[in-house]
Structure formats: structure tokens, C-alpha cells
Amino acid sequence: AQAIGLKVFTGFVYPGVGSSYNDDDLGQKRGGVLYFYNDTHVVLYGASNAEGTGAGIIFTGQFSYTRDQQEFSTVASVRVRVWHPGDFPVPVFQSGWLFMSAGSKGTTFIEVPHGLGSEPDYVLVHVRGNDGGLYGLVGEAQGSSMSREHYSAGLTSSWGGVMFGYNDTIVRILAPSTDDSDGKLFMENNYIYCTIIDP
């Protein structure tokens, strides 16, 4: 297990995340540090400014109704903290690795019964790359997405990230899908949007 913290001049510490939801093709500000890990390394990724579109290390939004809570920083101190698996108690439930695939109906939605009979105090969902540059590296799913698929004036943006939620019987895991019937949950402009999920 590990924790990534970002500290900017204001003194606030922002945690890193396990996936990114924004693309630079939209020409909007974005930011954040992603982290992935394996049994020997923790790999950090910051937003690239290759297209000159306002990449930051920390970005909390740019709408006027967020008032003085806005933060956009291009530099920050980064701290990595790592714990040995033995430092944590053994989980009362642990699934094996389950297959998911983005964009394909039927593989973007999983419900895993945890058998506790009550709402868990803490749930962690790991995502392990099966191909590409992140093969074998592990990231962590998030509780909400801050972006969505976007088509504007012929412009298509990439988006992604695995989300999860839980109740007293199941852990629900969602990957991005372009099929409305396969369930979506995202946060945009301080509002939470969702599509009813009917697996």
C-alpha cells in the first residue's frame, strides 16, 4: 500500500490518484499526479503540457462559483509513502483479479458480493494493467469521475478511470462505457450526474 501527497504553497496537501479522467485535446486546464506501483517501484505521472493547454500539478476547478477555493499550481513537492502489506490487517474479504474492459458493453460493470452483511468501514479496489505501458502496474479505483466523454465541434477527447462504490452487500465497479445502458457516474461543474445501472 502507498500514499502520494502533493503540497503546494498554500500548505494544503492533495492526494494523488490512480487514474486520469481528462484529455488535453479539449484545450482546458487540468492537473493531478497519477501513481502506479509494483513490487519494486512507485511510478509517478504529472500532466503534460505538450500541446500548451494548461497542464498543472494540482487543479481544483475554474468556475466562478467555487470562489476562493480554486487552486491551480504547476509545481509542488511530492511525497511517496509506502507500507509493507504486513502493516495492514488481513482483509475480511478479498476477490481475485477480475477482467474489465473499457467501452465494451458487458465488460465495464461488475458487482462483487462481499458477504459482510453490513457496510464496510474501508474498501480498496486495485486496477492492474494487462497491456500497454502500464502492464503489470497497479493503480487504485476512485469513488467519482470528474470528466465524461466529450464531443464538441468534431473534437473527441479521451477519458477513463475505474470507479467504485459499495453498500452492505456488494462492491460495484465501473469502467468507462460509451453505451448509456451500461451505467455511468461522473462529477462535472460541482454536480453529480449518474445513469441508472441495469446490468
Image (cartoon, helix red, strand yellow):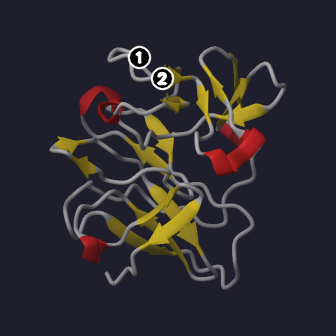
Residue type for callout 2: Ala
Residue 95 percent across, percent down from the top left: 48, 63
Q: Is residue 39 left or right of residue 129?
A: right
- 179 or 40: nearer the eye? 179
Give the residue number, with chain letter if any, for mark 2: 55
**Quarter of the figure that contains the C terminus:** bottom left
Residue 187 versus residue 76 in the image, above or below = below
User: For residue 59, what is the image quadrant?
Assistant: top right
Mark 2–mark 1 Cα distance, whole angstroms, equals 5 Å
72 displayed left or right of 121: left
Is residue 120 positioned above or below 42 on the image?
below
Decide which of 46, 122 is in the foreground and name it: 46
- N-term mark: 2 or 1: 1
Graded by Cα atoms within 10 Å as few (under 14), some (14 to 19) or many (20 or more), the crowding at tag 2 reads many
- Residue 28 in the image: state x and y as whole percent: 42, 33
Residue lying at 26% horizontally and 55% vertically, measured from the top left = 101
Q: How far across and how far down the image is residue 5, in percent?
A: 71, 29
